[in-house]
Amino acid sequence: MFEYYVDDAWPYAGPDQLAVRTKNFKLVDNFLENDIDELYDLINDPGEMNNLINDEDYDEIEKELRSESKRLQKI
């Protein structure tokens, strides 16, 4: 099960970020220049305080969530 979220504060400029969430993980794809994408383990870090985006142990999860995000953007 995936949950999809679009932040669209400026509707004419397009979304600033997209998020894909599963039961265990959430990926936030930030589109603004110099923004850092975010990946959180929602089971072990429910407060989303530890960004795992640069942790190589989570590369496969990041890849899966990015793939799902791209798929959902086409719908």
Image (cartoon, rainbow, N blue to C red):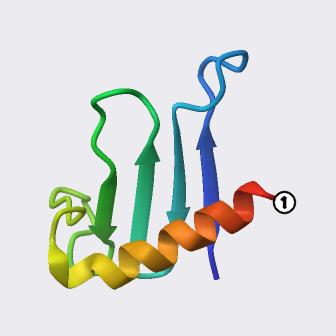
Which residue is found at the position 52% from the left and 54% from the top? 19
User: Quick one: label 1, few (<14), some, or many (20+) residues within 10 Å?
Assistant: few
Q: Position of residue 18 (x, y in %)?
A: 55, 47
Q: How many marks?
A: 1
User: 48 above or below 16?
Assistant: below
User: 14 above or below 48?
Assistant: above
Three-letter amino acid code at the position of disc 1: Ile
Which residue is found at the position 79% from the left and 58% from the top? 74
Q: Quadrant of the C terminus?
A: bottom right
Left or right side of 15 for 71 = right
Q: Position of residue 37 (x, y in %)?
A: 33, 49
Left or right side of 70 for 51 = left
Image quarter for residue 12? Answer: top right
Q: Position of residue 56 (x, y in %)?
A: 17, 77
Name, please, the residue furthest toward the right.
75
Q: Quadrant of the N terminus?
A: bottom right
Mark 1 lies on residue: 75
Q: Circle 1 — which element? A: loop
Image quarter for residue 30? Answer: top left
Left or right side of 54 for 73 = right
Nearest the camera: 57 or 6? 57
Q: Position of residue 8 (x, y in %)?
A: 63, 29
Left or right side of 25 for 36 = left
Which residue is found at the position 71% from the left and 20% from the top? 11
Nearest the camera: 50 or 68? 68
